[in-house]
Image: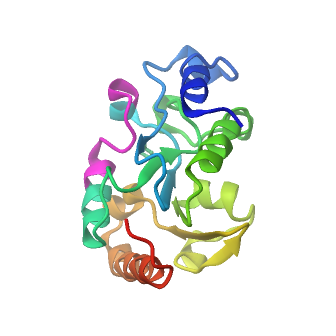
Amino acid sequence: MMPWEELERQCRACTRCGLCETRHQVVFGIGKRDASILFVGEGPGEQEDLKGEPFVGPAGKLLDDMLSIIDLNRENCYITNIVKCRPPGNRDPLETEQNACIGFLRNQTALIRPKILVCLGRIAAKRLIRQDYRISSEHGQWEERGGIWMTAIYHPSALLRDVSKRPETFDDLLAIREKICSLHILP
Ligand code: URA
């Protein structure tokens, strides 16, 4: 396991996959480096690629609102993505790109040692919970793995496209709040 400084330095200089050729900035992650709660999205979009920070575009605005419902924000949790560089045209990150990048997330998770890990959307859930994860039927369910409580909720971009998913996500957020309380975690 690398310490934060070395990990971030290597990530910012990474050329392990083709996304390094089209990126403007590596989007390493943001938040509290010893947070109890880790949120993992899919990969940077256009705005994130330009700014170097995760979830700063329209989906990010919605994520901020979702977090505030349960007293979370960019300072008291940690937010990052499966891949740290933008897939061109916002396509899904390829398996090979995910494989090249996942070590950075694993190292981040080992350093943070979160109690709760929330996958934002299908891509993160499939990669981190189970390859055959079905977000539409399994979102909001919990399983403990290696001392970390894992769950997935709809990606904020999906909630922008389809507002009918928002009530279920509200319930999932309240369940995250309850998990925080039952584990006696102070955000
Ligand atoms: N979508 C993601 O999955 N991650 C971001 O950082 C921005 C949009």
| Quadrant of the snapshot with the N terminus | top right
Q: Is residue 56 left or right of residue 141?
A: left
Residue 17 percent coordinates (x, y): 68, 23
Q: Is residue 32 left or right of residue 22?
A: left
Q: Work out whether residue 6 or residue 83 is closer to the camera in this orientation and state it.
A: 6
59 inside magenta stretch: yes
Does 120 sit above or below residue 172?
A: above
In the figure, residue 150 lies in which quadrant? bottom right
- How many numbered marks are there? 0
Does 90 sit above or below residue 179?
A: above
Residue 116 percent coordinates (x, y): 54, 67
In the figure, residue 180 lies in which quadrant? bottom left
Residue 5 percent coordinates (x, y): 54, 26
In the figure, residue 53 lies in which quadrant? top left
| Quadrant of the snapshot with the C terminus | bottom left
| Residue at image point 45% right, 79% down | 184
16 inside magenta stretch: no
Q: Work out whether residue 153 or residue 3 is closer to the camera in this orientation and state it.
A: 3
Q: Which color scheme did the rendering employ for the protein?
A: rainbow
| Residue at image point 48% right, 62% down | 36
Does 122 sit above or below residue 79?
A: below
Q: Work out whether residue 30 or residue 60 is closer to the camera in this orientation and state it.
A: 30
| Residue at image point 57% right, 14% down | 21
Q: Which residues are magenta?
A: 49-61
Residue 99 percent coordinates (x, y): 74, 38
| Residue at image point 33% right, 74% down | 166
Q: Work out whether residue 94 or residue 56 is closer to the camera in this orientation and state it.
A: 56
Q: Quadrant of ligand 1?
A: top left
